[in-house]
Amino acid sequence: MILVICLNPAIDVRYTLDDFQKNSVNRLNSVKKTAGGKGLNVSKVLDLLQEDVTLTGFLGGSNGEFIQNFLDTTKIKSHFIKIKGETRSCLAVDDDKTMTEILEPGPTITEDEKKMLLDYLHEVKDDYDIVSLSGSLPKGLDKEYFDEILKIFEEKKLIIDVSSPLLEHVALNDKINLFAIKPNEHEVKSIIDGNIETILFDQKFSHIELLIVSLGKDGSIARYKDKLYKITVPVIKAVNPVGSGDSSIAGLIYGISQNKSIEDSLKYSMTMGVLNAMEETTGYVNVEKIEEIYNKINIEVIK
């Protein structure tokens, strides 16, 4: 079973217009609101893949009710801690040439609310084999709290997708073994400078079994134990790339959950990222196209 922890969910608001002009009045063609946040996107794709997934974290206010209603409607299992603060909204402005994202920081989590989530995680830790933590921290949470969560699940397959400075802290914290992290090239080079192939084998990352570095439209490069892989993806017309990284995490989890080889799991990871980019809706893949795209993903051992 899979547990996805989303500490800072959001309502994703997407504005589409013809030509975004700064310092001017902009009239929109459409507005779309969806339940979002990195962990929610991961869960949505896993649900489409018919995986047994439960989502947890913090929800509050009318935005939290919007997200909970979506989860109830789609029947994605969830157990969120209800908080006093208001779950955030995040804005994406798409004018067909550029995509600008404006991300709210999120509510402030109280000490009581923090404890309630930790108590719940301790209670259910034996129910899950794979645990995914994606996204940012809301106010009131710090690196030490994140470490407490990792410590609870240190014997599970931990899959982490966060941004710096939390990413650097997790990547260099050798007190807890991680199954996988997924930074992009810029993020990993900000932690350790140098050639990407050399970086992935750096001793500082030895506690991480699988390190996947996203290269955007060029696919990814991954180090699994003592092997280095290059994964390339087909050229597509991207409709909405937002959420493709989250979908890639879902694809990786799917492969691991289904006991696929690491090569197949990496291909499923890239497949879901590509499929998400082909769709208007964030955190959505057309399952009927999985085989088609999967067969166009190329993976090779380069070291």
Image: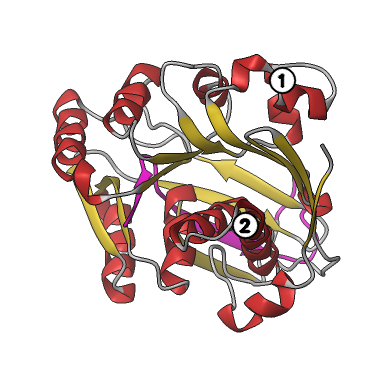
Q: Position of residue 173 (x, y in %)?
A: 48, 17
Q: Which residue is mark 2?
A: 269
Q: Position of residue 98 (x, y in %)?
A: 79, 53
Residue sitting at x 13%, y 28%? 112
Q: Which residue is mark 1?
A: 190
Answer few, some or many: residues within 10 Å of disc 2's Cα (few below 14, many 20 plus, some between 14 and 19).
many
The reply, left or right, for residue 284 in relation to residue 143 is: right
The local secondary structure at tag 2 comes to helix
Res 227 quadrant in image: top right
Residue type, label 1? Ser
Out of 206 and 47, give the one closest to the viewer.
206
Locate the C terminus by quadrant. top right
Relative vertical location of residue 96 with respect to residue 162 in this rendering, above or below: below
Locate the N terminus by quadrant. bottom left
Residue sitting at x 18%, y 45%? 124
Residue type, label 2? Ser
Out of 119 and 84, give the one closest to the viewer.
119
Q: Which residues are magenta?
A: 1-25
The reply, left or right, for residue 149 in relation to residue 241 is: left
Relative vertical location of residue 7 with respect to residue 50 in this rendering, above or below: above
- Rendered image: mark on residue 14: none
Question: How was this image coloured?
Answer: secondary structure
